[in-house]
Amino acid sequence: MDFLRIATYCFFISYLIFCHIVWNGCYNIYSSTEDEVYNMLYYRKKEKRPIKLEIRNELKVDNVKKVYVKKAPCPVLPRPIKSLFHLNWFRKSSDLVPISIHLYSMFDEKNNFLGFILLSSAIFTILEWMYIIYLASMVLWDGIIKPILKLVYLAISIYLILRFTVIFLPYTKSYMSQENYKHVSGCVFNFYNIIMKISKEVGSFMNRVMQENGTINKEP
């Protein structure tokens, strides 16, 4: 069972890398980027000038001229979706550039199979982004939001305990000696006053910060 699982993972990772290499082959052939293709597809009317895709003349691959004269641009995903394997560290690798061009030109004549590979690369990229968002949300929740909520919960709990203690403390006067009551009530009221003073200072500080930010935003 473990061997089958490992073999499945290896096949999945190999197919993922293969699809990304074929995807990068189109951009290596035309020596272009996702931003250039995206601008050509969606901002051509606004700019009123098409973006030219330069051909990489120094790379020689058999039958690659058929791909050069292809009218359709390379596939592109909506911004800012981009796989880690679509970045220059992988796309512009000296060992992978000729391989990617050769694979893309080899599958270019088989439109259905090439389309399936490119679609798989796009799906893997979307899944990769979903996983990154999931990890970021988990880190944000466990590292920032959850501790802040715990501190807020602790502060509210302490405030409520002190508040109810101050309210119900006079009713306990008959159950303890006068010296003990003065000592306990003095400690409780002093601590309560300190907490209230700190909360007022924090509230006034936050109000000043918000007012300063509002003044800065209003300035031209």
Image (cartoon, rainbow, N blue to C red):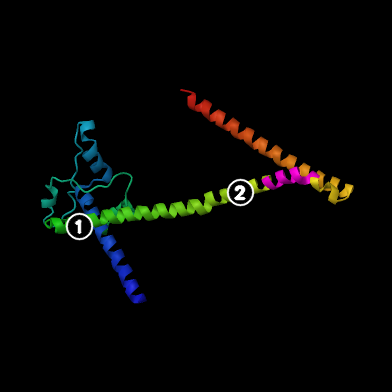
Vertical arrangement, residue 166 with respect to residue 83, above or below: above
- Residue designated by label 2: 153
Query: Which of these two is toward me, 191 or 48?
Result: 191
Residue 126 or residue 49, whichever sits in front: 126
> In the image, residue 101 lies at what x, y percent?
20, 55
Is residue 152 magenta-colored? no
Q: Mark 1 vs mark 2: which is more N-terminal? A: 1
**Dot 2 alpha-carbon crowd within 10 angstroms: few under 14, some 14 to 19, many 20 or more:** few
Instruction: Tell me the quarter of the picture where residue 48 sits.
Output: top left
Callout 2 amino acid: Tyr
**Which contiguous range is marked in magenta?**
160-170
Main secondary structure found in the magenta portion: helix
Instruction: Name the secondary structure under disc 2.
Output: helix
Is 96 rendered above or below residue 205?
below
Identified at 32% across, 49% down, the residue is 82
Indicate which label's residue lies in the foreground, 1 or 2: 2
Q: Is residue 166 rendered magenta in the image?
A: yes
Q: Which residue is mark 1?
A: 116
Q: Amino acid at mark 1?
A: Phe
